[in-house]
Amino acid sequence: MTLRTRLLRNAAVVGVSTALLGITAPAATGTTAGPADSLAWADCEGATVDPRQQCATLRVPLDHADPDGPRIDIAVSRIPAEDPDARRGALLLIAGGPGGSSLDDPSGKGQKLPRQVRDTHDLIGFAPRGLAPSTPVTCGLDHGDLATSKLRPWPAPDGSVDGNMATARRMADACARNGGELIKHLSTADEARDIDLLRAALGERKISAWGVSYGTYVGAVYAQLFPHRTDRIVLDSVDDPDPTRVARAWLAGHEQGVEDTFPHFAAWASKPGNPDRLARRAADVRPMFLRLAARLDREPIPWPGANPEELNGNVLRQALLDGLYRPSRYPALAELIRAARRGTVPPAPEAPPEEVLQNVAAVGAGTLCNDVAWPTSPAVYEKGVAESRAAYPLTAGMPRNAMLCAAWPYPPREAPVRITDRGPSDILLVQNERDVATPLSGASRMREALGRRAVMVTVDSTGHDAYLANGNACGDRVVSRFLATGERPDSDLYCR
């Protein structure tokens, strides 16, 4: 898959980031897996996985409040510890999303871990509830509503949210019509309870975890609900845990994330000798982009085979947001900008199969909308969009706009989990200074909420996903040492 394909392809709803009846429960009150929940490991299907990787299926309650009721499947994978004599336990890899899977991560990113971690830990992956090959869910959305610029709620060029509210009602109706009972039981707290059933089925008294992006919120919620089941917890590229907004805070964070990251892109895009150079000076890149987006608002360029089949201002803005996820995407973003300035488009981006997009969108929608109640009044979004457009023109009001959760038909079944400092001090946060999706400001709020339980490593780097990805050697060393030995810095650390 090319960089351009990855840049503009459709993905999860937000790229984006639940208490037990409003009360933070001690670990003893959490569900536990019984003997019938043992795992039968077998070879995995697919040619791309490491031959050592094994797969199994865990059966969990559809509704954790009804443990004897209907059950659903959770697909699980593992690569056993490479040195059985040195084995310490299991390291759970928690993907981002909602709508991401770590099922293949023991064979993929897990193999980047230092040998000492791979020697001592089974690497565990899973597909969260609702996401195939776990028992899948779908909303059956219209094809046009699977466009990323629809799943993320970009307002009209004049700032109107009327179209977004109509889209929200149409998409929410489809989820209610096609999502069945499972769509009502997708939430971060449900995923955390599934994880504890997985921990018990693995035979582990405690479990370690490496959560990335939305996976950091999953990891934090797990550590809050089951604090004495945790061993070593790494939260990498950290979500804002605001219990009053949850995913609304993650969406809102994009406006600051773009502002934090855009200067790095502008410096790259104006560097002499860069074959993808867009301007002579970094200061010229922003006004050039804003003029181009405004022109495309008025005069979209046909884009056969894309979704939507035109390059308009909001598609370009979404491409900017996607392109800032990591510096390796900058050339593809620059290629699109150059083409648009000429009045042309590159080849249409290749999208994953529609069945996959439908599944990912449904998992994202169910989780984001079930975690917390969203405002239903258009006036709330009109006010937020107007304020955001004025202060953050690069994101044009999208981060405070109405997504399908504004019309979600199901009230949350429980209040959001409030992340606190109650529990063992066994959490390490690692956060890039310039992160478009999970900005440093939100990570700092997670650090504050966790208090004495956590230490945070802030990395002088650009991009989403820090550890062993877009961070730096200093940050990687600190995290690797913690996973291998349990040793953390005595206080928060800045890795230049």
Image (spheres, rainbow, N blue to C red):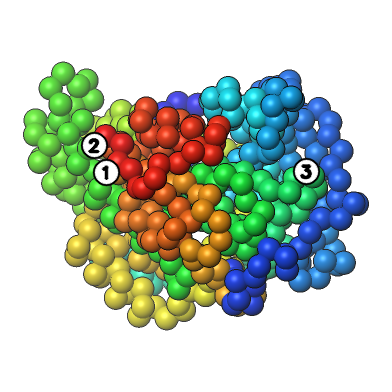
Secondary structure found at label 3:
loop
x and y percentages locating residue 245 in the rendered image:
44, 70
Q: Which residue is mark 1?
A: 261
Q: Which residue is mark 3?
A: 202
Residue 288 sits in quarter: top left
Depth check, mark 3 against mark 1: the one in front is: 3
Marks 3/2 in contact by CB < 8 Å: the verdict is no
The residue at 22%/58% (across/down) is: 392
Nearest to the observer: residue 149 or residue 471 = 471
Q: Is residue 312 left or right of residue 481?
A: left
Nearest to the observer: residue 294 or residue 2 = 2
N-terminal-most mark, 3 or 1: 3
The amino acid type found where label 1 is placed reads: Thr
Q: Image height check: is 130 above or below 472?
A: below
> Quadrant location of the C terminus?
top left
Residue 139 in view: no
The amino acid type found where label 3 is placed reads: Leu
The amino acid type found where label 2 is placed reads: Phe
C-alpha distance separating marks 3 and 1: 41 Å
How would you rate the neighbour count of disc 3 (Cα within 10 Å): few for under 14, some for 14-19, many for 20 or more? some
N-terminal-most mark, 3 or 2: 3
Q: Which residue is mark 2?
A: 265
The residue at 30%/41% (across/down) is: 494
The residue at 15%/40% (across/down) is: 285
Nearest to the observer: residue 253 or residue 313 = 253
Residue 170 sits in quarter: bottom right
C-alpha distance separating marks 3 and 2: 44 Å
Marks 3/1 in contact by CB < 8 Å: the verdict is no
Marks 1/2 in contact by CB < 8 Å: the verdict is yes
